[in-house]
Image (cartoon, grey):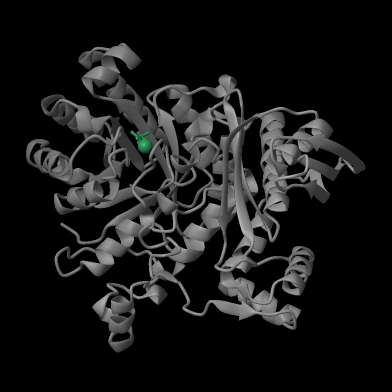
Amino acid sequence: MSDRVYIFDTTLRDGEQSPGATMNLDEKMQIALLLEEMQVDIIEAGFPIASNGDFEAVSEISKNIKNSTIAGLSRAKIADIDRAWEAVKHAKSPRIHTFIATSPIHMKYKLMKTEEEVLDSIKHTVSHARNLCDNIEWSCEDGGRSNLEFLYKCIELAIGSGATTINIPDTVGFTLPSEFGSIFKAVRNNVPNIDKAILSTHTHNDLGLAVANSVAAIQEGARQVECTINGLGERAGNAALEEVVMTLKVKKDLMPFHTNVKSEYITKASRLVSSITGFTVQPNKAIVGANAFAHEAGIHQDGMLKNAETYEIMTPESVGLNKSSLVLGKHSGKHAFSEKLKELGYDFGDNVLMEVFGRFKDLADKKKEIFEEDLIALAGERTLTYDEHIKFVSLEVNAGSLSKHQAKLTLIMDDNKQSNSSDGNGPVDATFNAIKQITQTDFRLKLYQVHAITAGTDAQGEVTVRLEDDDLSSQAKGSDLDIIVASAKAYISALNRLIFKKTKSIAKNSAEFKIEGV
Ligand code: KIV
Ligand code: ZN
């Protein structure tokens, strides 16, 4: 068996299923181009039947990506498969990924199908897909809770009908690594034609075991791992690509497998996905968290100075993290600024660069030291490619323990300047009330989070806001030295995204496109 493990990234499909993480076409394309550059083998670009937006994204990505296989997801339905093929057929290397649930609970309550009906459906849909495309992946949804004898029959039939990759998902993140590994072992020992397909693992993190389960599956024969940048994904997320790739790299003495992924792109990919989705990476997240390479305890710092390997099992450089943190000041020029942004993974055209540079100068006037994190926050806001239908202009607040909390806000809405003064329970509440008054909106605020980007009382505050309306939600970040201004920017950015989604109806969660079974 080969020691090459194929990396299948599903940030644009399963990752996008995280509430609030919906991305538009430009954003998906930026991520796909970076995944291609980092040599991800397969990019699952979306679920084409789910919405016109998904279809368009999968087609455009298929046309533009040349070095990775592009997969489109479909249920076990002919219309889904045809739609997936229509979208991926432009790719240099297309794949149709089709799935059906095989666990007793999913078959009985969700599909309302017997085992025989599921087997019929596998035969019918996989052979239909194979008539369209040579590269077919078949997944047994909820494989982790499926009856093994039935699973063997399904897999044998799927391979017999033309599947070239067999993916076993732990859809609900329920199995232990030992259990999940033994499913792969049993499948390898009991499915007669298993050598005709590549075995794949797809895990969810409900018990925090997604990566451990993927590793166990690799040890028992999986040679494709489905994962996402930053572990984004449905509920608690999927296995994190960066953790899988670095585990294989760091533990190669015990696990003699390798991937083709250029690990030096990991930090860049993590930042891009975080700024596009508005999902902040927790500081103690493995590999890509802000503290992943920080050594706080004196005894650790002492060891590090003597020999970095005392406390570091991989170098920051191996994941694309540069050690320098204090970067530019108010006298830095545009060229140095643009070079630094490129190093951090942001390559803007001239107009956007000038705008971000202007904001950098404003910040540098107020803040003595500008750190990488400050630049990432400035640049991250600009990676959002939604029309800025609503723009922040200015804000003045009354706050403190004695005065009435009041916000005087000015926005530009569709090229008209509009102002409002509102009261509230605290300056943030007053500011959000003023935004709601001007925009005549009242979406549910599902998340409001503030954190300091760097140390020091002059640090920029970064605020994350998630808004929700019926089945749609959107999340965005805003940063500023003033946390109330950062809050207003984050709210406005989330609002622009939500309005965009409502008008374009691109969200799969919308009633119109509600897809059962993923
Ligand atoms: O979790 C899951 O079962 C899935 C399948 C569609 C592969 O995402
Ligand atoms: Zn999944």
x and y percentages locating residue 69 in the rendered image: 43, 51
Q: Note whether residue 258 is visible.
A: no
Classify the position of the N terminus by image quarter: bottom left
Taking depth in this image into account, of 166 and 418 the one nearest to the observer is: 418
Q: Nearer the viewer, residue 182 or 466?
A: 466
> Quick check: can you spot residue 195?
yes
Residue 124 coordinates in the image, percent (x, y): 32, 22
Residue found at x 75% / y 34%:
433
Residue at horizontal 77 percent and vertical 73 percent from the top: 365
Location of residue 344 by image quarter: bottom right
Q: Residue furthest right?
A: 416
Q: Quadrant of residue 123?
A: top left
Q: Is residue 90 left or right of residue 226?
A: right
Location of residue 122 with respect to 270 vertically, above or below: above
Residue that appears at 72% across and 30% down:
503
Q: Which x, y percent locates residue 90?
A: 54, 45
Pick out the residue farthest to the front: 402
Residue, far bottom: 306
Q: Is residue 476 found left or right of 104 in the rendered image?
A: right
Q: Nearer the viewer, residue 243 or 163?
A: 243
- Dividing the picture into quarters, in which one does residue 332 lie? bottom right
Q: Nearer the viewer, residue 254 or 224?
A: 254
Figure quadrant of the C terminus: top left
How many labels were placed on the picture? 0
Residue 464 horizontal/vertical position (percent)? 59, 47
Q: Is 311 on the left or on the right of 416, as rendered?
A: left
Q: Is residue 335 above or below residue 498?
A: below
Q: Residue at x 70, y 72 (%)?
A: 367
Picture quadrant of ligand 2: top left
